[in-house]
Amino acid sequence: METIYYIRIPNEEDCVKAIGVFLRIPATRYRFPDNVMGVTLAHIHALQRANIPFEMASGRKWNGQAAASVQS
């Protein structure tokens, strides 16, 4: 089973571009409110190749390392 990473694409225009890129990826992706998506590593690599900015929403960096916690 492949790991799912939760990402957020803040810009609506970039989100539309990302969906176009994702259509070429055979792996399943999940879409949630506020432009949050559950994607595989293949999706993340495709976003990087297309220079589409995104941020991790899952608390983990795409390489599996723990993401920095947010302090308020």
Image (cartoon, helix red, strand yellow):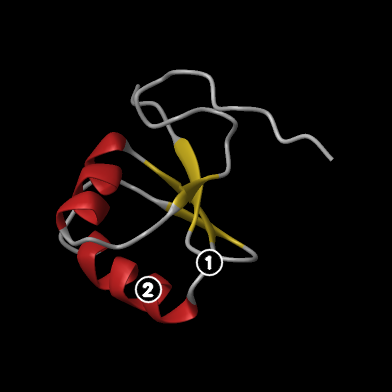
| Farthest right residue in view | 72
When the figure is inspected, residue 52 is found, relative to residue 3, above or below; the finding is below
When the figure is inspected, residue 11 is found, relative to residue 39, above or below; the finding is below
Q: How far apart are marks 1 and 2 (CA)?
A: 8 Å
In the image, what residue occupies the spot 39% across and 26% down? Answer: 3
- Mark 2 falls on what kind of element? helix
Residue 14: assigned label: 2
Which residue type does callout 1 highlight? Answer: Pro
Q: Give coordinates of residue 68: x percent, y percent.
A: 60, 27
In the image, what residue occupies the spot 22% across and 61% down? Answer: 51
In the image, what residue occupies the spot 26% across and 60% down? Answer: 22
| Farthest top residue in view | 65
Q: Give coordinates of residue 70: x percent, y percent.
A: 71, 35
**How many marks overall?**
2
When the figure is inspected, residue 55 is found, relative to residue 52, above or below; the finding is above
* The quarter of the displayed image where residue 19 is located: bottom left
* The quarter of the displayed image where residue 34 is located: bottom right
30 and 72: which is toward the camera: 72
- Mark 1 falls on what kind of element? loop
| Residue denoted by label 1 | 10
10 Å neighbourhood of mark 2: few (<14), some, or many (≥20)?
Answer: some
Quadrant where the C terminus is found in the figure = top right
| Farthest bottom residue in view | 13
Which residue type does callout 2 highlight? Answer: Asp
Quadrant where the N terminus is found in the figure = top left
10 Å neighbourhood of mark 1: few (<14), some, or many (≥20)?
Answer: some
Q: Give coordinates of residue 69: x percent, y percent.
A: 68, 28
Q: Give coordinates of residue 14: x percent, y percent.
A: 37, 73
In the image, what residue occupies the spot 34% across and 26% down? Answer: 2
Residue 57: assigned label: none
Labels 1 & 2 near each other (Cβ < 8 A): yes
